[in-house]
Image (cartoon, grey):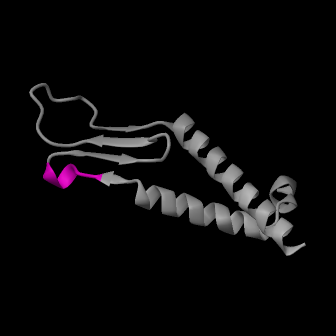
C-alpha cells in the first residue's frame, strides 16, 4: 500500500480515465453480426470468437493476463507522464 500512496492522486485519476477511455474507444464488438469481440489497446487482452465456423472452436473466448498487464503498465506510464507535464506547466 505504501507504493500506491507515493503517487499523486492526479496520476490515479488520469490512469483510470485513460484505461476506461482506451478500452471503450478501441473495443471491437462485432459478435452480434457474426464477428469477433476484442478488448484492449495496444495489446488485445480479451477476444471472443463469434459467428459460425466450419470447424467450431472448443473455446470461443480467450483472456491473456500478460497483455492486460502490458496495457496497464503503458496506461500508467502515460498517466505519470501527463501528471509530470501538468506539474511542470504549473511552475
Residue at figure coordinates x 11%, y 38% from the top left:
52
- Relative placement, left or right, of 91 versus 63 is right
Residue 50 place in picture, x, y as percent: 20, 43
Q: Residue furthest bottom?
A: 90
Identify which residue, 59 or 67, lies in the foreground: 67
Q: In this view, does 76 lie above or below 21?
A: above
Residue 41 place in picture, x, y as percent: 48, 47
Q: In this view, does 38 lie above or below 85?
A: above
Residue at figure coordinates x 82%, y 60% from the top left:
7
Identify which residue, 59 or 52, lies in the foreground: 52
The stretch of residues the image draws in magenta is 29-33
Instruction: Say which quadrant the C terminus sits in.
Output: bottom right
Residue 33 place in picture, x, y as percent: 14, 52
Q: Which residue lies furthest to the right in this view?
A: 91
47 falls in the magenta region: no
Secondary structure that dominates the magenta span: helix
Residue at figure coordinates x 42%, y 61% from the top left:
24
- The mark tally for this picture is 0
Residue 6 place in picture, x, y as percent: 87, 59
- Relative placement, left or right, of 28 versus 75 is left
- Relative placement, left or right, of 37 versus 41 is left
Residue at figure coordinates x 71%, y 64% from the top left:
12
Q: In this view, does 66 lie above or below 46?
A: above
Instruction: Say which quadrant the N terminus sits in.
Output: bottom right
Amino acid at each position: 500500500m505504501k507504493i500506491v500512496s507515493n503517487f499523486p492522486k492526479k496520476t490515479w485519476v488520469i490512469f483510470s480515465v485513460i484505461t476506461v477511455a482506451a478500452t471503450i474507444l478501441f473495443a471491437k464488438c462485432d459478435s452480434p453480426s457474426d464477428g469477433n469481440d476484442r478488448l484492449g489497446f495496444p495489446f488485445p487482452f480479451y477476444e471472443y470468437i463469434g459467428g459460425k465456423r466450419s470447424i467450431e472452436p472448443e473455446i470461443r473466448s480467450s483472456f491473456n493476463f500478460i497483455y492486460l498487464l502490458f496495457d496497464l503498465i503503458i496506461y500508467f506510464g502515460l498517466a505519470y507522464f501527463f501528471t509530470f507535464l501538468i506539474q511542470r506547466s504549473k511552475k
